Image (cartoon, grey):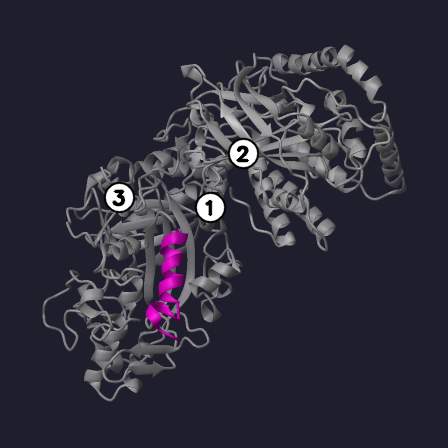
Amino acid sequence: MSARDEHLDLDDIQGVVLSGYGELPQASFVMLAFGDPELARGWVGRTAQGIASAAVGRPQGSSRVHLAFTWPGLEHLELSWQALKGFSREFREGLAGSSRRSRILGDSGDSAPEQWRWGGPGGSVIHALLMCYAATPEALEALLAEQREALAEAGIEALETLSSQPLPGGKEHFGFRDGISQPKLAGVSTSQDERQRVAPGEFVLGYPNARDQLTMRPMVDPIEDPDDLLPEVTLDSDLHDLGRNGSYLVFRQLSQDVHGFWSWLDAATPDGEARLALAAKMVGRWPGGEPLVKAPQQPAGDGTDNDFGYHHEDAEGLKCPLGAHIRRTNPRDMLPPKPGTEDSLAINRRHRLLRRGRAYGPPLAESLTPDDLLAAADDGAERGLLFLCLNADISRQFEFVQQTWVNNANFAGLYADSDPLIGARGEGQATFTVPAEPVRQRCHDLPRFVQVRGGAYFFMPGLRALRYLAASPRRLTSAVSAPAMPATLLPDTWWLRSARGLNVALETGIGVTRRFTRLRNVFDRAFQQPATDAVQGIILRRRRRHAIDADLAIAAERRLAGEEEVTRRITEQMTAFLLRTYRQGTAERAGNTKTYGLLEAEFEVLELPDDLRIGLFREPRRFDAWVRFGGPGPRVTPDIRNNGVLSLGVKLSGVPGETLLDDEDHTQDFSGISAPTFTTPDVFENAKLQRLIGVGLPVWYFLNPFDSHYLDMLLQALYAKAHGSPFEASYWSCVPYLYGKGRAVKYRFVPLLASQSRVPLPAPDDYLRLAMLRTLDEVEEVVFEMRIQFQEDPVTMPIEDASVIWTSPEIPVARLRIPRQTFATPERDRLARELTINPWHALPEHRPLGNQNRARKQIYYETSRVRQRINGEEHFKP
């Protein structure tokens, strides 16, 4: 079955997605602001019971309601961050969310978001859209009265109500038939016109789109959906699909200057016949809907024909001008590089919109004929179009059409033309070109006939997703398992300055102790493991006593409240550090900073039993790899001063399948450090540490008697030491990853070298790199064995706490082979800076788990891009 023949789950899709409700000409659209989240969820649940699905079919004189949400609205309903982050960037930012978006959409001057009546940056935050449809004005008023009563009971404010008014003959206010050319959903529509048939995934999430791919959509962990309200993801994943059967809804209130439109046409033409002809050329159809491609001189009376293309019928635009409105918004088969072919139609199908707009305001003239509209005086009344369209990818569909086709001055080889009907009028774009023989006609100084008065991006969920949104969010088991809030920094007093001095003294003392390597090695052999077991015993006793995470299933995550804000704060702090420290120089990583070496390697998957043949490990094979060995940071210092914990980053290339992070293709990354636990147990504690590092008091994080972390300090002290060589340390993942559906693992890279290098005293600044060079001179290859541990108990082997060492048996699954090579070169060091190691460069079967991994996705991505911008380097893709 092809992507365009995919059958839709009509019972779960809101009815308005598949029907414009022509039988219900009366409509009102109510912008809402929620109050108490619990009351709002209750209202959503009650409203969802009255929403008709697409399976019900077309309405027969009844009324309908539908519901959609903004990103702030979903956040207000306390949807988890895991789900919120799955929505597209455009939806998260909002229609008025950035100056770039306003520029590409043509929202400038009087149409700028700052001038909007609703949805703009200075207005009230819109949380939801209630869409009400009825057959008669009386039925609509009764429906609205019922809804207002329900809204008042739930403490929900109606910010704005926009009512539509049907116009005679299916026309819009300029007097032209509207809504003629709509895409036909394959698998639903019976149309056999391949030019109009579009894959359902172009409009409904969770189905293959025109590229036979699934558009990004929000997912939730099963632990966040204990009642199984949502459908499961159809691929090999344990996630539940919040986005499936939903769609993004674009809403824009467009005010039409009808008097200005016809007055300008009258002034630009010598008589009524020429005026009508020019108006038709600007639109691309005659007022009755007949296309100019079929009837270029005058209407032939054939009706609203939609069976035509452009390239073979009118390639030069002599019938329908190249810049006409309908030619821009739906170019059909005229798109390069192969106009007139199926390839051109395929490109067009990837940018279609499913329109659900309604006219609002009284007509300037009841007849809506051109002569009557021109003769009517400007009554000053507000009228226009409530533009609504559905699409699965706002950027690739709605925003692309607006930027690349509607507002593009160079569309189809033109020079200074935007859409003559709805386009913005920037400098040099106030022209309309009418191709003709022997000489073209150019109309200058077009005013802007359509202004934007408001707008927003909404998400229209499926009915199962609506019921999920109405349910109370999953809460933490107990206060014990809830994270503490980040530390509040104190004023810069004399005693705080004294504390910084003590911090420096302690760090200096720690650095001195690293020179006593032989004594430290003796200590490690005798006491490291017993001391580690004792510390872990204390941590685990607390977890068992309070049954922390006992309600979680194996491989289940628990999102921490406020986690996204903390991640954003850490990202900003690290970004600020990079900009402040390396603005005038070569930027290094904010963490795992110093590169000891970037080496080519081979990753060999071993012969494994059937139950371990998952994802990357599905079959024995070898992958090319890059391996980066690094130090902790955040600055590049002599190795003896800052090598307490080493790091390993591995990037495999040529991996079959799609990665979770879409900035790379066919890669799989692994990372580890030379300690079995992270410095901090979770992202909240990491934020505290980052803030204290910022004021020069990192040691205070561990020693603060009011918020102490003595156990974490002991664990770090047991493994932080001066290493002899990066080739001789073990590297633990510290945080877990999926291993197929319903299983979680941690991993470790164990060196198989027999030799042990000594730390030279006095130590050269780059003695670790020298040790690696020496080893590769002595052996043919350096080998690490990758071993995994399965989670067996959510209490004693938690997903969300990186201070707990898992104790399940280690199972070898692969070997990392590093051959003899030359790596100490400027070119290899530059490549190391361009390379990004991110645990989210991973197959879905090996998705990173836990709050630290969720934070690393954003932190690593953003800081790597900042580093590359400072250095003027490109992101390296193997």
Where disc 2 sits, the SS reads: strand
Where disc 3 sits, the SS reads: helix
- Tell me what residue is drawn at x 18 percent, y 67 percent: 313
Q: Nearer the viewer, mark 3 or mark 2?
A: 2
Residue 857 visible in this rendered orientation of the protein: yes
The reply to whether dot 1 and dot 2 touch (C-beta < 8 Å) is: no
The front one of 693 and 509 is 509
* Residue 269 against residue 203 in the figure, above or below: below
The numbered mark, 3 or 2, whose residue comes first in the sequence reads 3
Question: Percent position (x, y) of residue 117?
Answer: 45, 62
Q: Which residue in the protein does label 1 denote?
A: 71
Magenta segment's dominant SS is helix
Left or right, residue 44 beside residue 761: left
Measured in 3D between alpha carbons, the distance from the residue under mark 3 to the one under mark 2, in whole angstroms, is 50 Å
Left or right, residue 415 beside residue 114: left
**Callout 1 amino acid:** Trp
Q: Which residue in the protein does label 2 denote?
A: 625
Image-quadrant location for residue 721: top right
* Residue 354 against residue 253 in the figure, above or below: above
Measured in 3D between alpha carbons, the distance from the residue under mark 1 to the one under mark 3, in whole angstroms, is 22 Å
**Callout 2 amino acid:** Ala
Question: Percent position (x, y) of residue 437?
Answer: 23, 82
The reply to whether dot 3 and dot 2 touch (C-beta < 8 Å) is: no
- Residue stretch in magenta: 394-416
Question: Percent position (x, y) of residue 453?
Answer: 42, 64
Measured in 3D between alpha carbons, the distance from the residue under mark 1 to the one under mark 2, in whole angstroms, is 39 Å
Residue 412 belongs to magenta span: yes
* Residue 686 against residue 328 in the figure, above or below: above
Crowdedness near tag 1: few (<14), some (14–19) or many (≥20) residues, C-alpha within 10 Å: many
Q: Which residue in the protein does label 3 denote?
A: 15
